[in-house]
Amino acid sequence: MSSGVSGVFGRNAFNEATMRECLPKNVFQSLKRTLDGEQPLDPATADVIANAMKDWAIAKGATHFCHWFQPMTGLTAEKHDAFISPTKDGRTIMEFSGKELTQGEPDASSFPSGGLRATFEARGYTAWDCTSPVFVKEDGKNITLYIPSAFCSYTGEALDKKTPLLRSMDALSRQAVRVLKALGNGCTNVKRVIATMGPEQEYFLVDQSFCAKRLDLVLAGRTLFGAKPPRGQELEDHYFGSLHERIANFMNEVNHELWKLGVTAKTQHNEVAPAQYELAPVFSTVNVAADHNQLTMDTLQKVARRHGFVCLLHEKPFAGVNGSGKHNNWSMATDTGINLLDPGDTPHDNMVFLVMLCAVIRAVDQYAMLLRASVANAGNDHRLGANEAPPAIVSVFLGEQLTDIFEQLAKGSAKSSKRGGQLKLGVSTLPHLPKDSTDRNRTSPFAFTGNKFEFRMVGSSQSISGPSFTLNTIVAETLSEIADVLEKASDVPAAAQKILQDIATQHARIVFNGDNYSEEWAAEAARRGLPNIRAAVEALKTIPSPQNIALFTKHGVLSENELRARTEIFLEVYSRQINVEAQTMLTMARRQILPACCEYSARLGEAVTAVSGAGVKAEAQKAMLQKVCDLIATLQTRIEALEKARAGAAGTKGHERQAEAYRTDVVPAMQALRVVADELEVLMDARLWPLPTYAEMLFVR
């Protein structure tokens, strides 16, 4: 980084470097032991830390603090309290105690609980996640100290997305350390294994003036109507294209805002669809990555408004062009600095790597439906299985080198590794390029990419916490199974080799290196017995299975009640989201599209009357009028059909049955209404059409 960026980076984050400066040495060392999981935070230490945080934040202009957490709404939540405390003589002093730092008490009654709490039972607690840096956030003139926190009910049940994520990190660490100690191989001194993450964030930018005229973008975050424009992404000229100056200015401000918060925003570029872009950070621990991704989404939307844009994070804002995902680059690292998914130069000889690799492959195969469910929402239904990256079928891409090793393992043991070599481009002034030992597969939902796995099914609007704690937990389970065998083995290398052979034999079906979009793969996956769950509701219904309940309870990540509650919340959110979309469609169709179409038909009628008896010209206008009138009649019929379907679904009892009603009755009725409205858009006088078009929104900068 340049000296300018270095001066900005982390300026508003109470990170390790800042703590080292602000805290007494003994307090800092005590906190470090807490961060390393060696001891709980002492209340006296918390008081000293809180006071130092307060002084640091006030020096930056902060007047308030808040516990910042991730409830099950999918957003973040915060309640701001001032540092002020009244004195007896009528003045105030600025105070912040260790108790205020470590524990908050927001009202829990208005957050989704999935039946864990009655609505009148209001008490809930937030607890400081000291492993994620506290930061100062500037929202206009309001400057607040933000404390990343977990959120639980009065009875201690998780009401958020961070608590199970932190639990899953502990579970993964426990089981991975067991495996490493049993294997030896220079890893016996490892005390902790950390799940790491680098989430790529895709998003769209649309001019604010267009969004203001589209109720669907305002209320639903996606276009519910819109005819295909003359040009979409078929020229393939947007991906990695030159940045428009207005976009570049926006990205520059986003970067500086994130750098101030300690978010390592690194990569930015045009994405595949017009008006679509991507931002990617450097890897960090998975809970910090989750917090930073929430900050990234918030910053993208906030800065977009300053530049006259609206940032759309919906998975499919525009039909007919690519939607947006969030590619989660996941790996495991030891506290001694070893990436456990780094193959090294001779991966066939790297037993630690092979065991970790095979543990992940087994986990993905055994819990493919759970992984699919972890990314299920109404928005992602428009991406997964819809001829777009990635499909709804979960498979693993290993590439040529690792697939060859995996196949060798199935036969007994791996004895060689294919090499990448070098690329010679035939130009003397160009360097020879080292060729990776394997290609990349952009169509795979779960792809190995050098020293990590890229989970590409996550939706752009999602918190990464849910998919991440799912992945952590399923890998913890397979590592637990492996550790159970290795710890009892008299010959550990032989036992490890047998485990690798069994996994390579039993789970070869999940490995696929080809085109995941092809119809041939769908048929082949069915023959292999791989699930293909294309609808969110069907995926969500699989969450509270006996297998998943046993998994999450065994590792202390979620109790059965917590797991069932989450399923109920997800189904309820699905129903509510579709209901909002349906009601928005009805409002737009009745109050904007139908009146405009009627006005157009009236003008056509006047034109027909004016040329009555004029031969061919009159017949052409009569035919057009008839077509428009027929479409208007169909539009009205489909408006009524959608209202009937929506009312029926809204009145259905039971979260599962209601979500199913929205999926099977309301969604098709919405699509049917859209088809006729989009056909009318193509026929209408452009001056009368009431909505900004796709061509305007996707291409006007």
Image (spheres, helix red, strand yellow):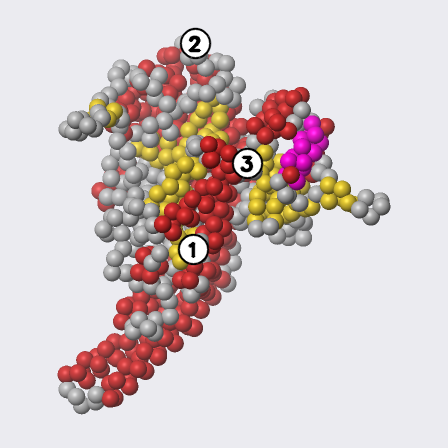
How far apart marks 2 and 1 lie (CA) works out to 64 Å
Q: Position of residue 238 (x, y in %)?
A: 29, 48
Question: The disc labelled 1 sits on which kind of residue?
Answer: Phe
| Closer mark to the observer between disc 2 and disc 1 | 1
Q: Position of residue 637 (x, y in %)?
A: 36, 73
Task: Find disc 2 in the rendering and name its residue.
Answer: 490
Q: Is residue 125 visible to the viewer in this orientation of the structure?
A: no
Task: Find disc 1 in the rendering and name its residue.
Answer: 309
Hey, which residue is sitting farthest bottom in the picture?
613
Q: Dot 3 surroundings within 10 Å: few (below 14), some, or many (20 or more)? A: some
Task: Find disc 3 in the rendering and name its residue.
Answer: 11
Question: CB atoms at circles 3 and 1 under 8 Å apart?
Answer: no
Q: Dot 1 surroundings within 10 Å: few (below 14), some, or many (20 or more)? A: many
| Residue under the image location 43 percent in, 9 percent down | 490
Question: The disc labelled 2 sits on which kind of residue?
Answer: Ser
Q: Position of residue 47 (x, y in %)?
A: 71, 31
